[in-house]
Image: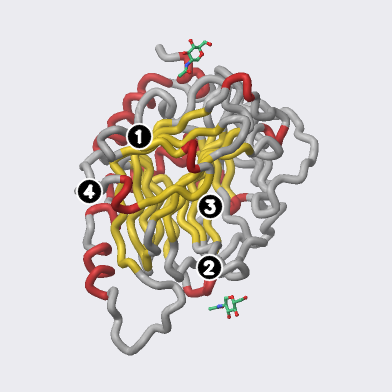
């Protein structure tokens, strides 16, 4: 049996549960109907241009991090709601200190009031798996991080997997392949914390030595450079919108919004909800909703699920499934106060 499965060792009847989860994950696997676009049709380099390497067929791109620079790309348009998706393969071997991010943002346009939806993949020392987090900000709410952190049920460096962000006026869903891993429902109490202004899609690889791995304990080691992350089969679906334009009486995007909301991936079906629950019960090791040290009262969009809460102590720290080594308090990235409390004796 794959050694990575040992992390589930605290759970009895491992093979039965494993089979069940595989079944659930594959039932949810009614493939999305996606129209992919060539890289040059939708995106352009953002920084580290020499480290943005297009594939020969035009459908993919590699982003490199070497000792001189990381790299990134950005969608050529901004979108008012949308489905942003790519097949991604993460760098292998020693990747401590590296952050690969796939996210939407309008931080370049609205410096003080930006919106953001994140996948952030956190590299690790050799032999330890990648962790990742999702997060969202609305209208500059950077003092209210909404991080969740997870493990994966596969090795993201071996094959491509599809990572997607759905964003409508009603809900936000983060997907890995066809498994929804997190859903945020628009909620009046969230107010402007719910992202609402047009955003671009970004993908980056960068040196996050001071933060990414065990709160900055392990730095990027350029002996292993270049670090290469690969993207292909990109999807950009949404209403292309000018973020500054005043909204007039007509709603130019309404047809496209309706189309987006009618897509198969725009709602969490019953079967997908089961696989989401399964994922969160087993692979989520941090959620701000259960972190009573940060939020004595959970923010309004939080839905407290008993079987999820069960994973955490009263403080929101992980109860089991990892080692409980104490971490020194370190300052992370200002917008990311979460520490990796689970060192994962995998
Ligand atoms: C990872 O490291 C091993 C041993 O150093 C090497 O053989 C292998 O090619 C590396 N893999 C990649 C993808 O760089
Ligand atoms: C968003 O933030 C800006 C700048 O802080 C503020 O002026 C505006 O009122 C906020 N919008 C909403 C809907 O709260």
Residues 230 and 55: in front is: 55
Q: Earlier in the sequence, mark 4 or mark 1?
A: 4
The picture places residue 271, in percent across and down from the top left corner, at 27, 45
Circles 3 and 2 in contact, beta carbons < 8 Å: no
Of the residues tagged 4 and 2, which is closer to the observer? Answer: 2
Distance of mark 3 from mark 2, alpha carbons?
A: 20 Å
Distance of mark 4 from mark 3, alpha carbons?
A: 24 Å
Residue at the spot of label 2: 109
Residue at the spot of label 4: 34
The picture places residue 103, in percent across and down from the top left corner, at 47, 51
The extreme right residue here reads: 328
| Residue 209 sits above or below residue 181 on the image | above
User: Left or right: 160 with respect to 120?
Assistant: left
Residue at the spot of label 1: 161
Circles 4 and 1 in contact, beta carbons < 8 Å: no
| Residue 333 sits above or below residue 79 on the image | above
Residues 54 and 114: in front is: 54
Element under disc 2: loop
Distance of mark 4 from mark 2, alpha carbons?
A: 29 Å
């Amino acid at each position: 049996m794959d050694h990575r499965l040992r992390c589930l060792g605290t759970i009895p009847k491992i093979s039965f549960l494993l089979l069940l989860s595989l079944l659930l994950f594959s039932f949810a696997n009614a493939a999305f109907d996606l129209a992919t676009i060539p890289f040059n049709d939708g995106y352009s380099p953002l920084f580290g241009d020499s480290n943005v390497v297009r594939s020969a067929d035009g459908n993919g791109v590699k982003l490199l991090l070497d000792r001189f620079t990381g790299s990134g790309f950005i969608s050529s348009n901004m979108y008012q709601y949308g489905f942003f998706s790519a097949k991604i393969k993460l760098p292998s071997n020693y990747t401590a200190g590296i952050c690969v991010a796939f996210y939407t943002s309008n931080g370049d346009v609205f410096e003080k009031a930006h919106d953001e939806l994140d996948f952030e993949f956190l590299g690790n020392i050799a032999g330890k798996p990648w962790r990742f987090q999702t997060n969202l900000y609305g209208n500059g709410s950077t003092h209210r991080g909404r991080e969740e952190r997870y493990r994966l049920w596969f090795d993201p460096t071996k094959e491509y997997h599809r990572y997607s962000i759905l964003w409508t006026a009603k809900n936000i869903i983060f997907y890995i392949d066809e498994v929804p891993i997190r859903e945020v429902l628009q909620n009046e109490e969230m107010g402007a914390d719910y992202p609402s202004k047009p955003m671009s899609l970004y993908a980056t690889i960068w040196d996050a030595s001071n933060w990414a791995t065990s709160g900055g304990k392990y730095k990027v080691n350029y002996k292993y450079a270049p670090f290469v992350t690969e993207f292909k089969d990109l999807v950009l679906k949404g209403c292309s919108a000018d973020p500054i334009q005043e909204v007039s009486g007509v709603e130019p995007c309404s047809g496209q919004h309706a189309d987006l909301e009618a897509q198969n991936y725009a709602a969490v079906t019953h079967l997908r909800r089961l696989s989401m629950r399964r994922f969160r019960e087993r692979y989520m090791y941090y959620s701000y909703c259960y972190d009573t040290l940060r939020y004595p009262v959970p923010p309004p969009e939080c839905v407290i699920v008993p079987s999820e809460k069960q994973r955490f102590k009263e403080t929101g720290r992980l109860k089991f499934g990892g080692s409980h080594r104490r971490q020194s308090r370190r300052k992370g990235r200002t917008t990311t106060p979460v520490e990796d409390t689970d060192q994962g004796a995998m």
